[in-house]
Image: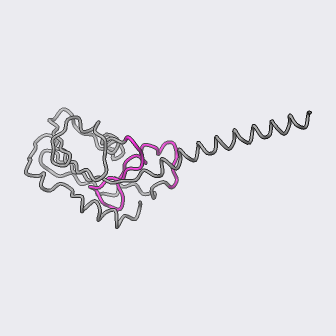
Amino acid sequence: MKQRTIILGLLFVSVVLMVSLFTYFKQFKKAKDVHYHAGFQVYADGKLQDFSDAKFMHIMPCGEGEHKEDENLEKAHLHDGVGDVVHVHRENVFWRDLFKNLNFKIDQSKPLESYVNGKKVEDILDYPIKSYDSVVIFIGKSDKNLLKNAVTKEKIVEVEKKSEGC
């Protein structure tokens, strides 16, 4: 009887452990499976902001060396000196997340006008980053003629093919 209780206890612990591990790896895999790109441009008083500098780049390859403190960085970041195509690796990521990671503060005391795929949107910082979207943000002075220079889907696809980081 005592031996049977021990065996049942070990079996129970094994099942709980297996379910826990399965749940953990399922969540881990789900987070890893998210990977898409979008294009963006920011104009401050008519001047295009350049995010291609090394200080804006995520150096580690996507998914490697992740730590809790880097969780937000894994949401949205830039790679390979390309300053107008964002890499997204989590669900429910917003443009606010990217600009936080770039340490780029959008001066909200100035007029802010934003376009997604050529259509005007409100509250761009709370707008989700979606695959192949092209976003243009005007801070201060806006010039709708600059929308013709927006990042194209073809450019995003080209960056995907060449991407060293992810």
Q: In which quarter of the image is residue 107?
A: top left
**Residue 104 % position (x, y):** 29, 44
Determine whether 164 is above or below 41 in the image. Answer: below
Q: Residue at x 26, y 55 (%)?
A: 84
Q: Position of 8 compared to 18: left or right?
A: right
Determine whether 24 is above or below 38 in the image. Answer: above
Q: Which residue lies furthest to the bottom in this view?
A: 162
Decide whether residue 110 is among the magenta residues. Answer: no
Colour treatment of the image: one colour
Q: Compare residues 104 and 129 and report the one nearer the observer.
A: 129
Q: Position of 146 compared to 1: left or right?
A: left
Q: Position of 135 compared to 20: left or right?
A: left
Q: Residue at x 31, y 47 (%)?
A: 130
Q: In which quarter of the image is residue 138?
A: top left
Quadrant of the drawing holding the N terminus: top right
Query: What's drawn in magenta, residue-wise?
Result: 64-92
Number of labels in the image equals 0
Quadrant of the drawing holding the C terminus: bottom left
Q: Residue at x 50, y 55 (%)?
A: 64
Q: Compare residues 87 and 30 and report the one nearer the observer.
A: 30
**Residue 56 % position (x, y):** 34, 53
**Residue 65 % position (x, y):** 52, 53
**Residue 88 % position (x, y):** 37, 50
